[in-house]
Amino acid sequence: MAAISAGSGHALPPVTLVLGGARSGKSAFAERMTMGSRRGCAYLATAEIHDAEMAERVRLHRARRDASWRTIEAPLDLAAAMVAETEQGAAVLVDCLTLWLSNLMHAGRDPGAETAALLRALGQVGGPIVFVSNEVGLGIVPDNALAREFRDHAGRMNQRVAGESDSVFFIAAGLPMKLK
């Protein structure tokens, strides 16, 4: 991990994807990777707080980051937020793509078209981007159509983002495995 940390004097690649399961350590890994960028760090949060449990999750994530981070809430318009936040070369951490996908589906937006727009926006960013996303396709087949649709959209989205990424990591039990 030190070899890729912006804080250790090594530049982040233009686009990185960090995948993993729930509570695998992917967000903390991505935060460590992004910290120390000479031009600042922005945290694009896609979560929407609808209950006390989610509020606690957000509180814990915020507590882990120091005051050098700028936090921007971008539950739907992620592409525009990425472009705006990297104008001065800042590193941007997007946490997470699967919550963004859930928001899109809830809003009735087309996940394929939104993913395509997100990938097009990568050509307009002025600093490195680190995406965090859940790998949801490793378990059993969900028992309902909505959950299967979400799993399928997430799998396709992750494949497309990985294809455009310069570096891809999979996190299991807090341990990173470099895939690309």
Image (cartoon, rainbow, N blue to C red):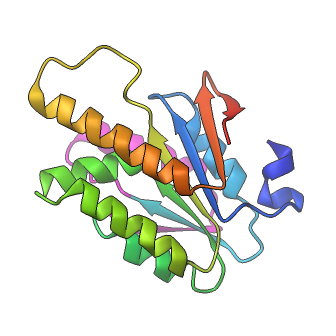
**Residue at figure coordinates x 40%, y 50% from the top left:** 97
Using the image, determine if residue 126 lies above or below residue 46: below
**Which of the 4 image quarters holds residue 69?**
bottom right
Instruction: Please say whether residue 56 is visible from this viewpoint.
Output: no
**Which of the 4 image quarters holds residue 115?**
bottom left
**Residue at figure coordinates x 79%, y 42% from the top left:** 1
Q: Quadrant of the C terminus?
A: top right
**Residue at figure coordinates x 43%, y 72% from the top left:** 120
Q: Nearer the viewer, residue 132 or 159?
A: 159
| Coordinates of residue 124 in the picture (x, y in percent) | 52, 81
**130 sits left or right of 160 in the view:** right
Instruction: Please say whether residue 24 is visible from this viewpoint.
Output: yes
The reply to whether the magenta stretch includes residue 9 is: no
| Coordinates of residue 59 in the picture (x, y in percent) | 43, 47
| Coordinates of residue 30 in the picture (x, y in percent) | 62, 48
Report the span colored magenta.
46-74
| Coordinates of residue 72 in the picture (x, y in percent) | 43, 69
- Count the labels in the image: 0
Using the image, determine if residue 23 lies above or below residue 72: above
Using the image, determine if residue 166 lies above or below residue 69: above
